Image (spheres, coloured by chain):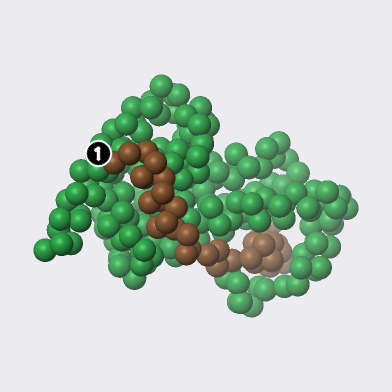
Chain colours: A brown, B green
Amino acid sequence: MLTETQLSERLHAATEQIDVEFSIEDVIGEDLDFRAAGNR
Amino acid sequence: MARLGGCMKRGAEFVDELMMLRNGDSTASADVFRALYEREAARQVRSATLLLGSRAAAQDVVHDAFAAVWRRWGSIADPGPYLQRTVLNGCRDQLRRSRTARRAMARLSQRDEIPAVDPALYDALARLRFEHRAALVLRFYLQLSEAEIAQHLGCRRGSVGPWIRRGLQQLAVALDEVEEHDAH
């Protein structure tokens, strides 16, 4: 049986090498370009 | 969506100015949005990857969730829970867009999308119902309480405990099957 501790450790180990591929600048910049295009 | 390094990339000072304009010249508000990104972006992308079995789809869902928070910034009382719910709804929508969640997971769980570390775990998670998978990830990856999980998933609190217990049992069985299959 998989224990809660084992699952928690495995979930963290399986994802620790995943990085965020967008920046806060991307999030805000896209919204600005959307608005600039007239899609308000 | 635009990714880091794309044509949308802008300087941090420019963004700070825009955030202050957007939020009534409130430096504190801009700082809060930036702090939310710094605190949540990685853990939301990682938990969404566990839910979707795809790094690329997770990046899209979390990016769009931050954009939704940004568009409503100033009118959201508690941005953290709002972001969490938006990510979960985005994951659910991503899976619903295909004919069935199981087929979507099979499509999304291509080996090139799954991180190299512990692909068996991703395969096993993909076999669970979304509610069971989400309950496990929210409880044992994000360390949320059952009450918080119920709030984010929009269900009764009494449903969460059974989902976690059933999810753990089914995940253990699925892991055995996947690992036995991979061994042959």
Local crowd at mark 1 within 10 Å, few (<14), some, or many (≥20)?
Answer: few
Residue B109 position, x and y percent, is 31, 61
Residue type for callout 1: Met
Q: Is residue B103 left or right of residue A20?
A: left
Q: Which residue is located at x 68 percent, y 37 percent? A: B78
Q: Which residue is located at x 78 percent, y 53 percent? A: B31
Q: Which residue is mark 1?
A: A1
Can you see residue B7? yes
Relative to A12, residue B170 above or below = above
For the residue pair B49 and A38, the one nearer the viewer reads as: B49
Residue B7, by quadrant, is bottom right
The C terminus of chain B - image quarter: bottom left
The N terminus of chain B - image quarter: bottom right
Residue B124 position, x and y percent, is 27, 51
Relative to A35, residue B140 above or below = above
Q: Is residue B107 left or right of residue A24?
A: left
Residue B172 position, x and y percent, is 25, 43
Q: Is residue B150 left or right of residue B28?
A: left
Looking at the image, the residue that sits furthest to the left is B184
Q: Is residue B16 left or right of residue B126?
A: right
Asked which secondary structure carries label 1, the reply is: loop
Looking at the image, the residue that sits furthest to the top is B158
Q: Count of labels shown?
A: 1
Relative to B44, residue B133 above or below = above
Residue B139 position, x and y percent, is 45, 38
For the residue pair B9 and B139, the one nearer the viewer reads as: B139
For the residue pair B98 and B46, the one nearer the viewer reads as: B46
Chain of the residue under label 1: A
Residue B20, by quadrant, is bottom right
Q: Which residue is located at x 73 percent, y 40 percent? A: B75
